Amino acid sequence: MNICVFLSAADLDERYTAPARDFATRLGKAGHTLVWGGSDTGLMKVVADAAEEAGGRLVGVSVDFLAAKARPVADEMLFAKDLAERKALLLARSDAVVVMVGGTGTLDEATDILELKKHGRHTKPVVLLNAAGFYDGLKTQFRRMEEEGFLPVPLSELVFFAEDGAEALAYLESRVRN
């Protein structure tokens, strides 16, 4: 399975890096492919290193203006002209999506895919890896949106909130057959 991971390229605390590393290790050991933003810095590097060390393949999708931060060696490395093309390539190359901790870019990627899914334009499973409760507030907001009629489909059909890497990977493997 090709698993796209949206996440930060920042250097982060162990409470965020440990769950990300665990998920990537599980991904690699299970023989899956990591499809990620291609950066060789911060949390992106942690995840790529762990997946590769565990035997997973790496497919990076960077963007021209970040080429200097791209991982020098991956099984495949693609370069998009802009962020919109990058998102499209990441989704096109994946069978499932995991959203890890991140800033505005990660939030943009997450909400973009959920909007596509809401309208039936994307059917791949999406997991938010809720490391250290990072997405508790977003989960509350999504539930409110659902309760007040802002979501035309049940929240459970849009996204699965996983508390750890084992739960995230088990959910994906139960929904994607290769």
Image: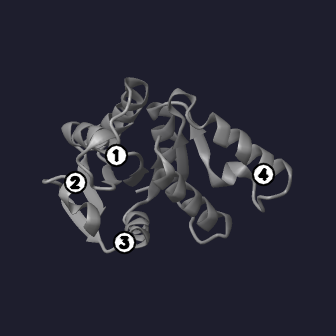
Q: Amino acid at mark 4?
A: Met
Q: Quadrant of residue 128?
A: top right
Q: Which mark is residue 69?
A: 2
Whichever of callouts 3 and 2 sits on the residue coming sooner in the sequence is: 2
Disc 2/disc 1 C-alpha distance (Å): 10 Å
Whichever of callouts 3 and 4 sits on the residue coming sooner in the sequence is: 3
Q: Residue furthest left?
A: 73
Quadrant where the N terminus is found in the figure: bottom left
Q: Which mark is residue 82?
A: 3
Report helix, strand or loop for mark 1: loop
Give the image location of residue 72, x and y in percent: 13, 54
Give the image location of residue 138, x and y in percent: 65, 42
2 and 1 marks in contact (CB < 8 Å) = yes
Report helix, strand or loop for mark 3: loop
Q: Amino acid at mark 1?
A: Ala
Count of numbered labels shown in the rendering: 4
